[in-house]
Image (cartoon, rainbow, N blue to C red):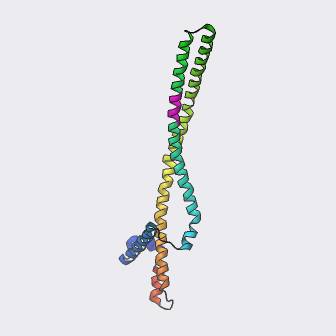
Amino acid sequence: MDTYKQNNPGDQSVVSKMQKKYWKTKQVLIKATGKKEDEHVVASDAELDAKLEVFHTIQMTCADLLKTIEKYQQRLNAVSEQENELGLFLKVQADRGEVQIGRMIDATGKALCSSSQQRLALCTPLSRLGKELATFSQRAVSDTLLTINQMEQARTEYRGALLWMKDASQELDPDTHKQMEKFKKV
């Protein structure tokens, strides 16, 4: 089909539009049923399919990493809280015991409280990492996914057109002017 008619769908005939939709639908059905597609067409898309696989891996990894960061923060808070409570308990108990043992228990309690504070300090950079990863996932990954969906639609239309051309070329007799025009139209 010439470029002008492709860019101006109002100029296309109803039959041409129906044929285009038929072949696109046929391609969608081939893809949905898992029917074997033309090996040359599939091979030509191998590089693109590899890049799509990388994208889907990035998408899943981002989601998994966000879940992991959230769980890690929850566990950090829980451990820090328990450690701080134990440290406070030991500091209180240090006053009740013997002098030497009391000093060791008090030192242990202070160390546990200090450790819990340092553990809580990890939450700030971890939270920032989570926010930046969420932003990346929400913006870059979702924008790329929209582009990929548009590309998949275009690829389906393209492959449908290839099916149409293949069908028309099988019936092609170069000596017949009408069949040549039909092939050019496709």
Towards the viewer: 165 or 43? 43
Q: Position of residue 120 (x, y in %)?
A: 55, 28
Towards the viewer: 89 or 151? 89
Towards the viewer: 27 or 83? 83
- Residue situated furthest left in the rendering: 14
Q: Position of residue 34 (x, y in %)?
A: 47, 68
Q: Residue at x 40, y 72 (%)?
A: 21
Towards the viewer: 170 or 83? 83
Q: Does 108 appear above or below 153?
A: above
Mainly helix, strand or loop, the magenta region? helix
Q: Is residue 2 visible?
A: no
Q: Is residue 59 visible?
A: yes
Q: Residue at x 53, y 47 (%)?
A: 62
Occupied quadrant, residue 16: bottom left
Q: Is residue 73 magenta?
A: yes
Q: Does 183 appear above or below 50?
A: below
Q: Name the side, left or right, on which 41 lies relative to 33.
A: right
Q: Which residues are magenta?
A: 72-79
- Residue situated furthest bottom in the rendering: 175
Q: Position of residue 113 (x, y in %)?
A: 56, 21
Q: Is residue 153 magenta?
A: no
